[in-house]
């Protein structure tokens, strides 16, 4: 293995070629390293907690394909399930036993799910859940939180106006003013503001959609009472409460954030882990609402590859392992605690007052000296220091998400040896990030 991870001629060359044929050389923007500069590493394989790039460098992986790889890479049971399924054809476009088993298991494991519909991505799940909430309530407006990400459907790509109560503005060209006008944006962890907004639009808010643990502006846990308060407001105003658990589902607890915090949404969106690394999403919830979906009800939603057998077998193998292991989440918690305590020791040793957050096997080191409770606070982080920290970690074989505004994830395959290596690297990277 080439020793110097700083040099990556193979990735560099592939990136140049990719940029000729793919916009920005990537199929999802944050992969391009825009937030940190440098050459994105092209990955050729992964095993357990480790990634290997095209130059033969190995890294401890804290991206986990942006969330799905809870069991680590190339889990033997998941791979076997995919291989076995592929022999019997990769798609039928007809009902299957395995999709029924996945639905059954999801409803068993996620407390608020009574019925569930499979789709192909998290984006599709949230998009469909909002359409359903609108169809069910007969209302148009939705409330979302600044800094929460729910995929790239038009009506989610809305920024909060400067005044909290102003209508949202599109934050991508291609999103119409008309669409933006139906999205109301509130500050995360600010219940009073949600109350104000919902009261200012009587009988017109179809749903409140929230990441019950925010994971797309770094990792920000819900403040005590925040989720309970949303539940109450939705009940008072006849709005549907949607927990977007695409990231937190099976990540922060077996039953997701709703189990961890004991607050039940009306609808839940899922993705990432439930596909075992294949493209999957799902939305589900109370039967009375789910029965509004076609063909039982009037709200249309469909998909050629929905419930795809390869994805369902990969998902089922993953969920089965999660359901059958009594200690999986305790083990993850132990790893998380070791990382958290070690990080705090590193920060203390260097006299750095930065904020470390963690919920289960996701978390974030914010380069901020103040508490981070919402998007505005996250935006105030020292992204230049983060950039230097990121490259310091990468050179020492620790692969973090290339942005201050992303969470880290670890898997059941991250053991004490990986934690020790990570913390040693972190000490060096933090020190280097602070040399002027
Ligand atoms: C990743 C994510 C999505 C989008 O899922 P895709 O599969 O990328 O479309 C939606 N919501 C949350 C909370 C996510 O983390």
Image (spheres, rainbow, N blue to C red):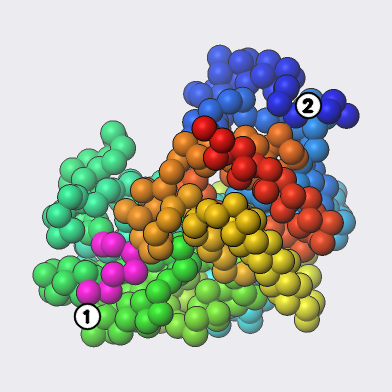
Which of the 4 image quadrants contains residue 254? Answer: bottom right
Return the residue nearer the eye: 271 or 345. 345
Of residues 371 and 59, the one nearer the viewer is 371
Callouts 2 and 1 close, C-beta under 8 Å? no
Q: Is mark 1 within 8 Å of ligand 1?
A: no
Residue 80: tell me if it is visible.
yes
Q: Secondary structure at mark 2?
A: loop
Task: Please rate how many residues cluster around mark 1, counting C-alpha atoms within 10 Å: few if below 14, some from 14 to 19, many from 20.
Answer: some
In the rendered view, tell whether residue 110 sits above or below residue 342.
below
Q: Nearer the viewer, residue 14 or 316?
A: 14
Q: Residue at x 18, y 43 (%)?
A: 177
How many angstroms separate mark 2 from mark 1 (CA)? 59 Å
Corner quadrant of residue 144: bottom left
Label 2 sits on residue: 4
**Percent coordinates x, y for residue 233 in the rendering:** 26, 80
Q: Residues within 10 Å of mark 2 (few under 14, many from 20)?
A: few
User: In the rendered structure, which disc, 2 or 1, sits on the residue that comes first in sequence?
Assistant: 2
Within 8 Å: ligand 1 and the Cβ of disc 2? no
Q: Position of residue 118 (x, y in %)?
A: 56, 62
State which quadrant residue 425 falls in. top right
Is residue 358 inside the magenta stretch? no
Is disc 1 placed on a helix, strand or loop?
Answer: helix
Residue at 51% across, 24% down = 24
Q: Residue at x 81, y 61 (%)?
A: 415
Front-most of 425 and 142?
425
Find disc 1 in the rendering and name its residue.
237
Question: Quadrant location of the N terminus?
Answer: top right
In the image, residue 188 lies in the stretch drawn in magenta? yes
Query: Which region is colored magenta?
Result: 186-192
Q: Is residue 128 visible?
A: no
């Amino acid at each position: 293995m080439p020793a110097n991870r700083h040099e990556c001629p193979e990735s560099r060359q592939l990136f140049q070629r990719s940029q000729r044929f793919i916009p920005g050389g990537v199929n999802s923007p944050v992969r391009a390293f825009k937030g940190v500069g440098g050459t994105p590493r092209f990955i050729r394989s992964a095993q357990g907690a480790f990634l290997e790039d095209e130059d033969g460098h190995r890294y401890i992986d804290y991206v986990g394909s942006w969330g799905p790889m809870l069991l680590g890479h190339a889990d033997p049971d998941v791979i076997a399930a995919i291989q076995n399924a592929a022999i019997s054809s990769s798609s039928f476009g007809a009902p299957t036993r395995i999709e029924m088993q996945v639905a059954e298991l999801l409803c068993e494991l996620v407390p608020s799910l009574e019925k569930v519909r499979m789709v192909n991505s998290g984006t599709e799940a949230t998009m469909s859940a909002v359409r359903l909430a609108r169809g069910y309530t007969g209302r148009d407006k939705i409330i979302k939180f600044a800094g929460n990400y729910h995929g790239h459907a038009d009506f989610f790509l809305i920024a909060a106006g400067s005044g909290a109560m102003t209508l949202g503005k599109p934050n991508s060209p291609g999103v119409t003013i008309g669409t933006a006008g139906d999205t109301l944006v509130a500050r995360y962890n600010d219940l009073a503001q949600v109350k104000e907004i919902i009261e200012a639009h009587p009988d017109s808010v179809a749903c409140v959609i929230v990441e019950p643990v925010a994971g797309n502006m770094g990792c920000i846990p819900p403040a005590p009472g925040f989720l309970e308060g949303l539940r109450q407001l939705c009940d008072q105003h006849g709005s549907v409460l949607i927990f977007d658990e695409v990231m937190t589902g099976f990540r922060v607890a077996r039953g997701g954030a709703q189990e961890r915090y004991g607050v039940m949404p009306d609808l839940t969106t899922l993705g990432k882990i439930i596909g075992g690394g294949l493209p999957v999403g799902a939305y589900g919830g109370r039967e009375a609402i789910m029965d509004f979906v076609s063909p039982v009800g009037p709200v249309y939603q469909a998909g050629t590859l929905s419930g795809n057998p390869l994805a369902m077998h990969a998902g089922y193998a993953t969920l089965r392992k999660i359901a059958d292991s009594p200690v999986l989440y305790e083990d993850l918690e132990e790893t998380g605690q070791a990382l958290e305590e070690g990080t705090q020791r590193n920060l203390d040793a260097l006299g750095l007052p930065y904020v470390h957050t963690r919920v289960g096997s996701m978390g974030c080191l914010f380069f901020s000296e103040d508490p981070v409770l919402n998007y505005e606070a996250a935006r105030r982080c020292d992204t230049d220091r983060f950039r230097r920290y990121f490259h310091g970690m990468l050179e020492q074989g620790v692969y973090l998400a290339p942005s201050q505004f992303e969470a880290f994830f670890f898997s059941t395959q991250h053991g004490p040896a990986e934690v020790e290596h990570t913390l040693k690297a972190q000490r060096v990277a933090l020190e280097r990030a602070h040399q002027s």
